[in-house]
Image (cartoon, helix red, strand yellow):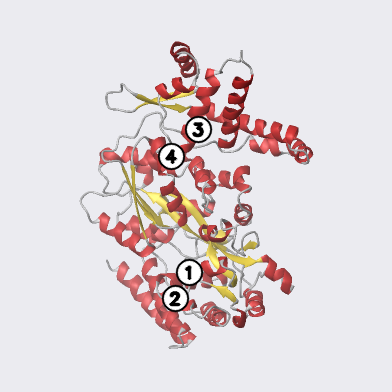
């Protein structure tokens, strides 16, 4: 849209300079400035629009009033007195301009694109025009600015998606009409700060990001406010959220936040390396090990696979997901079609299942994986496993989709354009799944009542399809909504969205591998410690499973006695 705006601005200049009797089009000139300001996050005033019109003040004022009356322009008070306003394109104008931009681009390609003309015409008749009409429009501006003394305060995780959100702060501030103050922490420090904040008399944050496994704990401890008490849930179109991500936001049947990013952990693999070696993409753990062995060449600085193996939280997540790869959750969840049931977890009738036959297979698999991993694998965590993959030193890597920008946006990366995306290969005749991670954004339970309605409105904006699309267009590779994954503009940016959508429709996106019970953080930590000792050769797999089981059982017993 910005390209079309720039083109029309320059074309208008050329026409007005060429023909002496050519008169400026004030409506078009004002529309171009209004849309450019909206897309770039700049405040546009009525004075600026009148100045851009290139016609006398009285004429421009009359035309601007006509646009306001026609519902094409909205004005929002900039001060408490309501005497000055900022000007914004209405939803109607944005929708009309999105379709117009598509038509202009198609016309230009058809007239001047030479070889492109035929394909563009074919695309028009065979679906492209229909699909582009369904493109999600840019982020809307709220008719009234949010009333939040000191601005909106947000606590998030320091990952690429939330950093994109921080980079787009101007656009979001323009949308909600309030300043945004964002604090970002690593995963463990984020949890500590959220828990510490809950102990305060008054919350320091209006919105907090919550890792999916924490939902049960944060709900039980009263850290998060049940969203149904603060807003009409239907306003956010729950059916549009990926099913696994939306279910993971619930505890005891109540949603405690809105999915801000749904990011499954996938297997990234180098398609060019596999093709050269004559290997098929692995669907089983045996095939994965065979491929890792075939591509492992330490003498050339090339290693078979990278994964989360750092002690503590990082490896703990890997253990739970590997158990799931062998068909077993870490708790005794009942089987249901497509996986395991989690709706009963708030009843607290569950026990830990680590020391089992499937658990032993999972432990032995991790030990075999170790043989084809880089020498520093036992200190690799979230980002360290993907950086060497992006640098071309790793043939495969387990990684969340949010990490894909490390190679998808780096034109110098050997993995750029050569990466395939798969659900986790499965063992023990289990079904392939893609364990869902990511974050919801919720409202702290101790937020003052007078701030709740504004915080809810900001939460709705941050998780809207328009915002989700904006994150993707600015480098994010996570997506919480079906509509965003189906958007043609999004599909063109990365094959990851089509791959994840296909997994979702095949029911491979699952969040049961990390069930959000109150004890899960401690269970993850225990697994990350005991299995790390195993990988270091200090204890054998059987002893590892026994110790992890005993410690996890004690944690569950402790929580139930409270």
Mark 1 highlights which residue? 384
Quarter-of-image position of residue 392: bottom right
Pointer 1 with pointer 2, Cβ within 8 A: yes
**Which circle marks residue 284 in the picture?**
none
Q: In this figure, what is the number of numbered marks? A: 4
The residue indicated by pointer 3 is 36
Q: Residue furthest left?
A: 201
Marks 4 and 1, how far apart at CA: 31 Å
Location of mark 4 (residue): 171
Upstream in the sequence, badge 4 or badge 2? 4
Residue nearest the observer in this picture, 385 or 224: 385
Q: Which callout, 3 or 4, points to the residue nearer the camera?
A: 3
Report the side of 84 relative to 493 (left or right): left
Name the quadrant of the C terminus: bottom left
Q: Nearer the viewer, mark 3 or mark 1?
A: 3
Going from the N terminus, do you reach mark 1 or mark 2 first? 2
Q: Nearer the viewer, residue 561 or 196?
A: 196
Residue 353 or residue 178, whichever sits in front: 178
Q: CA distance from mark 3 to mark 1?
A: 39 Å
Cα gap from disc 3 to disc 4, whole angstroms: 12 Å
**Percent position of residue 166, x then y:** 41, 48
């Amino acid at each position: 849209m910005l390209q079309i705006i720039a083109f029309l601005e320059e074309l208008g200049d050329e026409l007005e300079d060429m023909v002496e009797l050519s008169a400026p089009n004030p409506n078009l000139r004002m529309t171009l400035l209004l849309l450019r300001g909206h897309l770039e996050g700049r405040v546009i005033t009525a004075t600026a629009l009148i100045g851009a019109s290139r016609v006398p003040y009285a004429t421009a004022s009359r035309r601007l009033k006509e646009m306001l009356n026609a519902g094409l322009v909205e004005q929002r008070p900039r001060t408490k007195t309501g005497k000055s306003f900022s000007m914004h394109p209405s939803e109607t104008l944005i929708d009309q301009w999105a379709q117009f931009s598509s038509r202009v681009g198609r016309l230009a390609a058809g007239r001047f694109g030479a070889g492109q003309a035929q394909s563009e015409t074919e695309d028009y008749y065979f679906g492209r025009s229909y699909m582009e009409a369904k493109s999600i429009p840019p982020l809307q501006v709220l008719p009234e600015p949010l009333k939040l003394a000191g601005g909106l305060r947000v606590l998030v995780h320091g990952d690429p998606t939330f950093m994109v959100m921080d980079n787009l702060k101007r656009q979001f501030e323009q949308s909600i009409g309030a300043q945004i103050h964002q604090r970002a922490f690593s995963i463990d420090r984020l949890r500590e700060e959220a828990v510490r904040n809950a102990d305060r008399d008054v919350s320091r944050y209006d919105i907090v990001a919550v890792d999916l496994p924490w939902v049960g704990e944060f709900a039980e401890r009263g850290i998060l406010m049940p969203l149904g008490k603060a807003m009409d849930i239907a306003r956010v179109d729950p059916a549009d959220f990926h099913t696994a991500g939306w279910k993971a936001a619930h505890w005891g049947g109540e949603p405690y936040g809105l999915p801000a990013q749904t990011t499954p952990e996938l297997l990234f693999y180098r398609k060019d390396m596999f093709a050269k070696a004559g290997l098929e993409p692995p669907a089983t753990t045996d095939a994965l090990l065979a491929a890792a062995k075939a591509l492992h060449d330490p003498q050339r600085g090339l290693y078979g696979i990278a994964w989360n193996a750092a002690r503590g939280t990082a490896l703990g997540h890997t253990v739970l997901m590997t158990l799931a790869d062998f068909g077993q959750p870490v708790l005794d969840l009942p089987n249901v079609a497509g996986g395991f049931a989690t709706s009963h977890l708030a009843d607290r009738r569950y026990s830990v299942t680590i020391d089992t036959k499937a658990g032993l297979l999972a432990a032995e698999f991790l030990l075999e994986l170790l043989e084809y991993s880089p020498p520093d694998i036992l200190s690799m965590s979230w980002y360290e496993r993907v950086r060497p993959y992006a640098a071309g030193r790793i043939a495969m890597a387990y990684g969340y989709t949010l990490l894909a920008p490390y190679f998808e946006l780096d034109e110098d990366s050997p993995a750029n354009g050569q990466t395939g995306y798969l659900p986790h290969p499965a063992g023990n005749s289990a079904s392939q799944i893609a364990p869902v991670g990511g974050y919801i954004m919720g409202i702290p339970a101790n937020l003052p009542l007078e701030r709740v309605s504004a915080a809810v409105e900001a939460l709705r904006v941050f998780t809207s399809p328009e915002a989700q699309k904006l994150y993707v267009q600015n480098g994010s590779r996570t997506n919480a909504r079906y509509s965003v994954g189906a958007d043609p503009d999004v599909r063109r940016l990365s094959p990851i969205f089509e791959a994840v959508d296909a997994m979702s429709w095949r029911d491979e996106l699952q969040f049961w591998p990390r069930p959000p019970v109150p004890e899960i953080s401690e269970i993850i930590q225990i697994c990350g410690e005991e299995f790390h000792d195993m990988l270091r050769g200090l204890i054998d797999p059987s002893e590892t499973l026994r110790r992890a089981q005993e410690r996890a059982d004690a944690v569950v017993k402790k929580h139930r006695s409270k």
